Image (cartoon, rainbow, N blue to C red):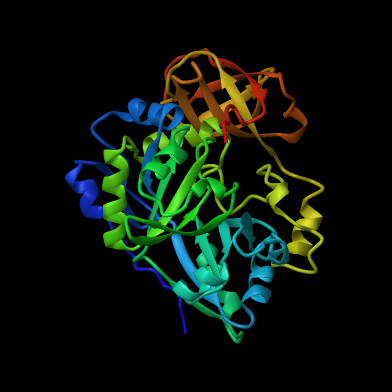
Amino acid sequence: MTDISFARSRSSPILSVHKELDAEFFIWNQMLTSKSYGNGVSCEHLAIRQSAGLTDMSGIKKIWVGGLAAQEVLDFVITKDCSKIHPGSAAYAALLDENGCLVDDVIVFHLTPQEREIYDASWLICFGAGFGVNYFAKSLQGNQVTAKSDDNIACLMLQGPDAEKLLGSAGLASSCAELKRFEHGLFSIHESEVMIARTSYSGEDGFEIFAGPEDAKKIWEILVALGAMPVGFDAIDIARIEAGLLFFGKDMTGAETPMELGLDFIVDFSKRNFRGKAALQKKAQKPRFKTVGLALDGVAPFFGRASVWMDGVSAGSVSSYAVSDWLGKTVAIAQIKPELAINGREIYIFDDGSFANEGRKGVVCPRQFYTNA
């Protein structure tokens, strides 16, 4: 059985919960997704950094994969070596096109025997907002692989320094503290059987809870009652930029190589083959730009597309930025010419949406501004 199509208009299994909380919405990955709640973006962001924030990440595209050729097909599709992803662990990886450009980023979960029995699959792939599902579909034809998309299962992301403690207080039948980063397993929360992974998207420790609609609603209510704050994507965006994490549609567009994005660590060239490998090997030696961090003077937003200049010469452009009250500065992710990507180098940012003639001063730096994971 192979059905990996997703509806053009998708809906979170717990959409009613967000509506009851008067969430502000936007469309992400074809799904109505919470931008923020009534507490304000700054308050939600501080919850991630100081206690615990709870986010509905159901907008990721989830596909369960099984069959005799499942691992072989996955090995061709993703840039990580599947033989090194052991049951009960997961890996962050990329999908490339034939030209070696990154068309999606994914987290690939190798299921345990107990998880396989429940989900009738041996792997779970969670796709971002790129074009990965289409490229994955190309590789299924003629192979002994079963694949099924699943928008019926919710993904709740709990992150922050209190995340582990809150889960421990939520009535887990066994402790999630046994999980290391990028490990997962089956747990029971108030008699609800769920899969929990120790993964997050903020630079903080965190967990993702995969649960059916009714169980997800119940778990959301339990965690909020214990002190987790509902957090929308506006606050998540600030946190992920502080952590130097990339977002498809802003920092990644499908036209960049992993090396240009600073994601070489998710490419395993020792693998015999994967889609785009030969093209990537040629391009890896001559990146067109480098993705870097920028620390900017002032705590103020941009109002248009921002360009990066050095010594009066155009050096690149900003792809994402955040006004970080937590760090006390404005931080950005930018793509600049490789020869200019030197930490500590002075830059000026010119905001196309501002009438000011003077630019904002800053410096090139590593893009991981903060992590406590």
Compared across the picture, whether 97 is left or right of 269 comes to left
Coordinates of residue 161 in the picture (x, y in percent): 48, 32
In this picture, is 228 found above or below 114?
above
Coordinates of residue 98 in the picture (x, y in percent): 68, 66
Q: Quadrant of residue 343?
A: top right
- The front one of 58 and 194 is 194
Which residue does the image show at 46% across and 72% down from the upper left? 119
Among all residues in the image, which is located at the extreme front? 173
Which residue does the image show at 49% across and 75% down from the upper left? 117
Compared across the picture, whether 324 is left or right of 286 comes to left
Compared across the picture, whether 109 is left or right of 338 comes to left
Instruction: Name the quarter where the C terminus is drawn.
Output: top right
In this picture, is 230 found above or below 323?
below
Which residue does the image show at 51% across and 67% down from the upper left? 133
- The front one of 96 and 350 is 96
Residue 313 in sight from this viewpoint: no
- The front one of 48 and 273 is 48
Which residue does the image show at 50% across and 37% down from the upper left? 202
- The front one of 9 and 311 is 9
Coordinates of residue 361 in the picture (x, y in percent): 58, 14
